[in-house]
Every structure is written in structure tokens, then in C-alpha cells.
């Protein structure tokens, strides 16, 4: 769970983390954090919307940097022939770097 403060710069995305853009936190309540007219669940980062379709997410700048670093490492591992499935989403960037280093040393 991330902590937010009014005026903090964050990254907000649309469905499936597409179209990331910077935003500024305008309101912090007990359960939700607002960026402009959009409202996000503070615990999960998921956008609070009606209608039943997937909304966007909110990330702190640090969390966004970590997510993009992990995504880049996963793409690099795929290029090396390593396909991660299942619980791979819980791996940290340090874990992924260690796997990458091992895979890079293996003869093809």
C-alpha cells in the first residue's frame, strides 16, 4: 500500500497500464485518492469506477519506475529464451536480474 499526499506527482494509467501520464494528487481520503476527477482505491491503486469495466491504476513515481524496470527485464529474459509464468509476477527486479545473469551465461 502506497501513501499519498496532496500535491504529490503520480503516474496514472488507463486500462491495462496503457497511456501512462503524470498527474497530481488533488485529494486524499480515508479509502480513496483523487487525481483530478479520477478516484483510485488507496490500497490497490485501482480506479474506482462504475460500469464493471477495467479502469486505470495509480502509481507513485517509485512504484512506476520499479514496474517498468521489471517489465524491461522480463522482455530481456524472453529474448534469452526464458519464459516466466505463474508466480513470476511476484519476483523483484533483483530476482529477475539474477535470473537474467544466469541465463546470459548459458550457451545457446
Image (tube, helix red, strand yellow):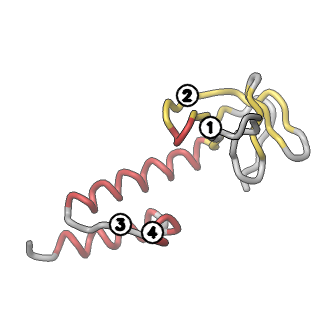
Q: 88 and 1: which one is in front? A: 88
Q: CA distance from mark 2 to mark 1?
A: 11 Å
In the rendered image, which quarter contains the N terminus?
Answer: bottom right
Q: Residue at x 21, y 58 (%)?
A: 79
Q: Which mark is residue 21?
A: 2
Look at the numbered disc 1 and give the secondary structure of its residue.
Answer: loop
Q: Please give left or right for residue 49 compared with residue 93 in the image.
A: right
Outermost front residue? 51
Indicate left or right for 81 with 5 as reference: left
**Marks 2,3: beta carbons within 8 A:** no
Pick whichever of labels 4 and 3 is earlier in the sequence.
4
Quarter location, residue 50: top right
Q: Mark 2 vs mark 1: which is more N-terminal?
A: 2
Q: Residue 10: horizontal and vertical position, in percent?
A: 64, 35
User: Going from the N terminus, do you reach mark 3 or mark 1 first?
Assistant: 1
Label 3 residue SS: helix
Looking at the image, is mark 4 or mark 2 nearer the viewer?
4
Picture coordinates of residue 28, whole percent (x, y): 85, 37
Which of the marked residues, 2 or 3, is nearer the chain's N terminus? 2
Q: Which residue corresponds to mark 3?
A: 97
**Residue highlighted by disc 1:** 56
**Number of other residues with Cα within 10 Å of mark 2, as a class: few under 14, some 14 to 19, many 20 or more:** few
Residue at 64%, 37% (x, y): give it: 55
Q: Do labels 4 and 3 touch, CB within 8 Å?
A: no
- Asked if the residue under mark 1 is in contact with the one under mark 4, i.e. CB atoms within 8 Å, the reply is no
Which callout, 3 or 1, points to the residue nearer the camera?
Answer: 1
Amino acid at each position: 500500500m502506497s501513501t499519498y499526499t496532496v500535491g504529490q506527482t503520480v503516474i496514472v494509467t488507463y486500462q491495462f497500464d496503457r497511456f501512462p501520464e503524470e498527474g497530481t494528487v488533488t485529494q486524499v481520503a480515508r479509502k480513496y485518492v483523487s487525481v483530478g476527477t479520477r478516484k483510485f482505491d488507496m490500497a490497490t491503486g485501482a480506479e474506482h469506477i462504475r460500469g464493471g469495466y477495467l479502469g486505470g491504476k495509480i502509481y507513485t513515481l517509485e512504484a512506476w519506475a520499479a514496474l517498468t524496470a521489471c517489465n524491461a527485464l522480463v522482455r530481456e529474459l524472453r529474448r534469452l529464451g526464458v519464459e516466466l509464468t505463474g508466480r513470476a509476477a511476484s519476483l523483484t527486479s533483483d530476482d529477475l536480474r539474477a535470473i537474467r545473469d544466469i541465463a546470459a551465461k548459458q550457451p545457446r
